[in-house]
Image (cartoon, rainbow, N blue to C red):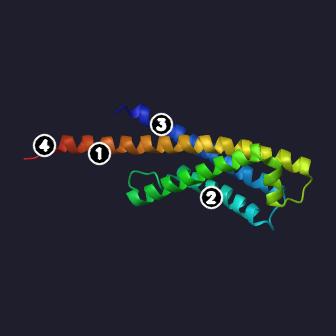
């Protein structure tokens, strides 16, 4: 493996996670501006954005994607990130296709016109999060695969020196 390729992949992975963190926190503030805290659906929407931020922050810190990380933690992070990506995509789809129904279900206290604009902005960010989350997962897989290939190459080299 070329040392530069892994470095570029790692930089792209970090960039993806930092943009995800910014988009998820923006979604949190936009969702809070809808004033829907008494609504159970609103709380679940806030929880989804917070969970996305947590997974992207974990990706930035490398706590789940480092080579020394146990496979179970890496698998749990991957599964959680994939689920949040799917739910973000579903929220984005609802925000764009059924804006008024989704807004009424959220029980927002803002005017309908303003709420629709805010909800479509959340939908746009949700679409970006959906795409970035899958890109980050692909990059994490690539980084993990490169680490496994490097370990296999090291073992192969050591086997030739075995007496």
Judged by depth in the image, the label closer to the viewer, 2 or 3, is 2
Judged by depth in the image, the label closer to the viewer, 2 or 4, is 2
Q: Counting residues from the N terminus, which is met first, the one under dot 1 or under dot 3?
A: 3
Q: Is 96 left or right of 83, judged from the image as shown?
A: right
Q: Position of residue 54 (x, y in %)?
A: 60, 57
- For the point 66% across and 49% down, which residue is it? 90
Q: Counting residues from the N terminus, which is met first, the one under dot 2 or under dot 4?
A: 2
Q: Residues within 10 Å of mark 3 (few under 14, many from 20)?
A: some
Label 1 secondary element: helix
Q: Residues within 10 Å of mark 1 (few under 14, many from 20)?
A: few
Q: Position of residue 17 (x, y in %)?
A: 58, 46
Q: Counting residues from the N terminus, which is met first, the one under dot 1 or under dot 2?
A: 2
Label 4 secondary element: loop
Q: Which residue is mark 4?
A: 161
Are the residues tagged 2 and 4 within 8 Å (C-beta)?
A: no
- For the point 71% across and 58% down, which residue is it? 45
- Cα separation between marks 2 and 3: 24 Å
Label 3 secondary element: helix
Say the numbered circle drawn on residue 9.
Answer: 3
Judged by depth in the image, the label closer to the viewer, 4 or 1, is 1
- Cα separation between marks 4 and 1: 16 Å
* Nearer to us in this view, 111 or 19: 111
- Cα separation between marks 1 and 2: 32 Å
Q: Which residue is mark 2?
A: 51
């Amino acid at each position: 493996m070329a040392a530069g390729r892994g470095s570029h992949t790692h930089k792209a992975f970090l960039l993806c996670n930092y943009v995800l963190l910014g988009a998820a926190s923006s979604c949190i503030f936009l969702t809070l501006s809808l004033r829907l805290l008494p609504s159970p659906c609103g709380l679940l929407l806030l929880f989804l954005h917070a969970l996305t931020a947590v997974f992207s922050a974990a990706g930035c810190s490398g706590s789940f994607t480092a080579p020394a990380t146990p496979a179970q933690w890496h698998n749990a992070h991957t599964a959680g990130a994939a689920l949040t990506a799917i739910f973000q995509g579903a929220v984005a789809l609802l925000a764009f296709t059924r804006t008024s129904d989704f807004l009424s279900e959220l029980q927002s206290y803002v005017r309908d016109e303003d709420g629709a604009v805010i909800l479509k902005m959340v939908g746009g960010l949700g679409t970006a999060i959906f795409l970035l989350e899958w890109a980050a997962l692909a990059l994490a897989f690539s980084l993990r695969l490169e680490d496994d290939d490097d370990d296999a190459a090291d073992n192969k080299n050591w086997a030739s020196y075995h007496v």
